[in-house]
Image: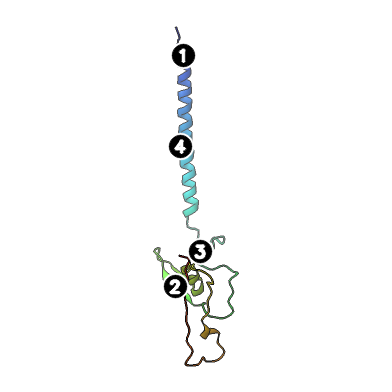
Amino acid sequence: MLKLRTEGTKFFSNAIMRFAEIYIFMSVLYTLNYFYIKYSSDESSDDIMPRNEPGLGLQTSSSWGQDRISWKSSGGVYDSMTEEFFLSKVFSESMQPTHVIPYYFRAETTPDEEDITITTLITSN
């Protein structure tokens, strides 16, 4: 006849329970630390870059598109970005070029009254 030893299974059962308790405790500590670091308000931090600003590599040859668009976000903070950056995001799904300067901004002389300008927006769908 086969006899089971209950002492051994009780030891493993206790060990598994202790491991689960330690794992849950460490998970809670890790989560609290993550949220504390992520959402603690440290306004003097220099390593946080503004999210709505275009990259430093953007340069334009004229002042067209450099007007700033501002709005109040849900947190009560005013955000702003250049008109050119805003239009590049709005028309990101359209086919290129994304930087179109109307003729009357680059013209050196006044166009004739008979001249017309036709603009077409081509999308991929």
Q: Nearer the viewer, mark 2 or mark 4?
A: 2
Mark 3 residue crowding within 10 angstroms, few (<14) / some (14–19) / many (20+): few
* Amino acid type shown at disc 3: Arg
- Label 1, label 3: how far apart the Cα atoms are: 63 Å
Alpha carbon of mark 2 to alpha carbon of mark 1: how far? Answer: 74 Å
In the displayed structure, would residue 30 be above or below residue 7? Answer: below
Label 2: how many Cα within 10 Å (few below 14, some 14–19, many 20+): few
Q: Residue at x 51, y 86 (%)?
A: 104
Nearer-N-terminus badge (2/1): 1
Q: Which residue is mark 4?
A: 24
Residue 77 picture location, percent across and down: 43, 66
> Which residue is at a point 45% across and 20% down the rendered structure image?
10
- Mark 2 lies on residue: 70
Q: How many marks?
A: 4
Check contact, mark 4 vs mark 3: CB within 8 A.
no
Q: Kindly report which numbered mark, 1 or 4, lies closer to the viewer in this rendering.
A: 1
Which residue is the site of mark 3? Answer: 51
Pointer 3 with pointer 2, Cβ within 8 A: no
